[in-house]
Structures are given as structure tokens and as C-alpha cells.
Image (spheres, helix red, strand yellow):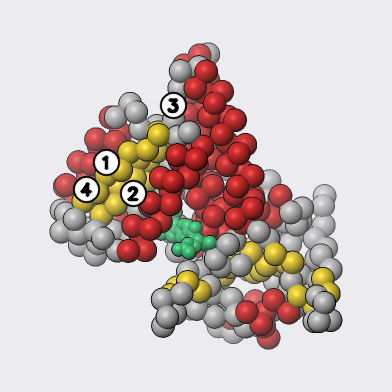
Amino acid sequence: MLQFTPAAPGLADSGVVTAEILDGKATAAAIKSELAVRVAKLAEQGVVPGLGTILVGDDPGSRAYVAGKHRDCAAVGISSIQVELPDTATQDEIAAKVVELNENPECTGFIVQLPLPKHVDTNEILGLIDPAKDADGLHPMSLGKLVLGQDGPLPCTPKGCVEILRRYDVPIAGAHVVVVGRGVTAGRPMGLLFTRRSENATVTQCHTGTKDLAGVVRTADIVIAAAGSAGLITADMVKPGAVLLDVGTSRNAEGKIVGDIDEAAREVASWIAPMPGGIGPMTRAMLLTNVVEAAEAAQAASAG
Ligand SMILES: Nc1nc(=O)c2c([nH]1)NC[C@@H]1CN(c3ccc(C(=O)N[C@@H](CCC(=O)O)C(=O)O)cc3)C=[N+]21
């Protein structure tokens, strides 16, 4: 079995040791060109994958993410279906849109952009998605399959974290992975994914109730910061040579996107997936991957 050995930190021109970049933008671009080839193959068989999105309300951040997803689709030849509702939409109105996409043959996979307005029961909405069209891997059936180790769509952010580490040959098996955060889209499924046999990491799941967060993070070979708390992980909390994945997104006073990991931590780490430019683009690429994988599986089933 592959054992974890941290990569050596690189020496920058200044002589300061600084982490190498896990470039999510470039990696996502490579994945998108691979997907374009697979989408073209499906097209030859008369299958056009279609991604649906349901956006409720007009939060500018959510709107920007959804717009990005549709741009990505266009780039790889996936058609897209955009559904929008005002933030006053009722539970029933949102549920009806889910049912509509479940029944729309042009939509082969879809997502409900989160968070939903406070008056909405999010779990009920996620549970209404046809599991065969669950592009986000957030349906209870998909999350259950993740726990059971069965094949199924994986949540995009954790899947993107594994994928970028694989593509840079950063070893996962045997590593001590410290996940900070337990949110449903990132932190919670992250821990589950990294403990699967195929990943084989040892995971410590930290959250706002963790005592001595600094002490725990300091024992990590790989730190995955998904708390959504700007600058939470500081240089003194990082073991020299550790690998850092910055998943948190917050906006600072100037409206700039900032991650959970402080800049200075780069001088201690061997690799970092920065925010922006790291896991965000990977998350989007994994959404496309889920859509293409589902379309290929459906095509294989109907041909077989
Ligand atoms: N059902 C659902 N599925 C999601 O996957 C989901 C969601 N709801 N709600 C919100 C979060 C957040 N999220 C991001 C995706 C890409 C970037 C991304 O590409 N960020 C760019 C920066 C973008 C910019 O500069 O505006 C980057 O990191 O380089 C960020 C955040 C997906 N989420």
C-alpha cells in the first residue's frame, strides 16, 4: 500500500520556502477538454446531456455560480436549462420545479442551488430529486451510497478535492486528512469520501465544537479547510510540508473572495489549492463530470 510522504516544499527565488500551487483552473480546463470528447461520442449516439439548475432568489453570489455552470456546459457541449424563482417562492412552487425537471427528458441531470431561502425545507427539496438525475450527489440516496461504498454521483466539492490531488500525484492513502467544517455540500461528505477504501486516508473531522483546533490541524498531512471562515487556518497551525486545500469562500470588506487559509501558511506548506483558482473551478468541473457520467450510464443501460 502507498504510504504518505509529504512532497518537499519548493524554494522560491527569494529563498523563502513556499508551497507549489495545485492549479484548479488549469486542471479544470484539462478535465473540460476530456469531457468535450466524451460528449461528442454521446452525440454520435444521439444523446445530448442537459444540465438543469434551479436558482431561488437573487443572491449575487449564487447567481454568479449558476451562470458559471451554464458557461461551462456550453464550453463542453452540454445543453442547459435554467429555472429561476423569486425568493418568495413557496415550498410547493420549488417542489413543482423539481418534479418538472425530473420529468423533462432534455434534462439528464440537475442541481438546486443552495442555500435556499430560510422558509424552505431544503432536505425535503433535495429528497424530491430523481436520484438518476442527481448531478450534485446531495440526494439522500446518493449520500447513502457514499456511506455504503456503492457507485453513485459524488458531491462535487469533495470529488474535486480527490481529483486534483490525484492529478498532481499527491498521495492520499495513509495520509492524515484533517477536514475543518461539516457542511452538507463540502465538509461532511469530504470526510466520508476520504475514508473510503479507494482513498484510504485517516480522517479527523473538525468543526466549530472542536477543542484545540490548532493542535489538531497541526497533526495533518492534508488540511481541507471548508469552514467558510476567512483566515481561520494560520501558518502556525500548519505542519511543515503539509498539503493545504482551501475550500472556504467568504468575501472581505472590499468584496474580494477570500478563503479559510491565511496567505502566510503558504510558507510552511508543500502544496496549496488556493482560493480562488483551486477547488472552486474543480467543483464546477466535477458537476459536468457527474452529468456526463450519468448520461453515459443511461446510454449504456438503454443500449445493453
Ligand atoms: N447545490 C449546490 N451545489 C454547489 O456545488 C454549490 C451550491 N449549491 N451552493 C454554493 C456552493 C459554492 N460553490 C462554488 C462553486 C464554484 C466556485 C468557483 O468557481 N469559485 C472561483 C471564484 C469565483 C469568483 O471569482 O467569483 C474560484 O474559486 O476560483 C465557488 C463556489 C458551489 N456550491
Q: Is residue 179 above or below residue 18?
A: above
- Does mark 2's beta carbon lie closer than 8 Å to ligand 1? yes
- Left or right of 162 in this view: 10: right
- Work out whether mark 2 precedes mark 4 in sequence or the reverse, and give the earlier one: 4
Where on the image, by quarter, is ligand 1?
A: bottom left
- At label 2, the amino acid type is Val
Q: Select label 3 or label 1 by which is in front.
A: 3
| Residue receiving disc 2 | 112
Circles 3 and 1, Cβ within 8 Å, touching? The answer is: no
Circles 2 and 4, Cβ within 8 Å, touching? The answer is: yes
Q: Secondary structure at mark 3?
A: loop
Circles 4 and 3, Cβ within 8 Å, touching? The answer is: no
Q: How far apart are labels 1 and 2 at the CA level?
A: 8 Å
Q: Nearer the viewer, residue 112 or 92?
A: 112
Q: Position of residue 194 (x, y in %)?
A: 63, 55
| Residue receiving disc 3 | 48
At a point 64% along the width and 51% down the height, the residue shown is: 27
Residue 198's label in the rendered image is none
At a point 84% along the width and 68% down the height, the residue shown is: 8
| Residue receiving disc 4 | 94
Circles 1 and 2, Cβ within 8 Å, touching? The answer is: yes
Q: Secondary structure at mark 2?
A: strand
Query: Which quadrant of the structure image shows residue 232?
Result: bottom right
Q: Nearer the viewer, residue 50 or 228?
A: 50
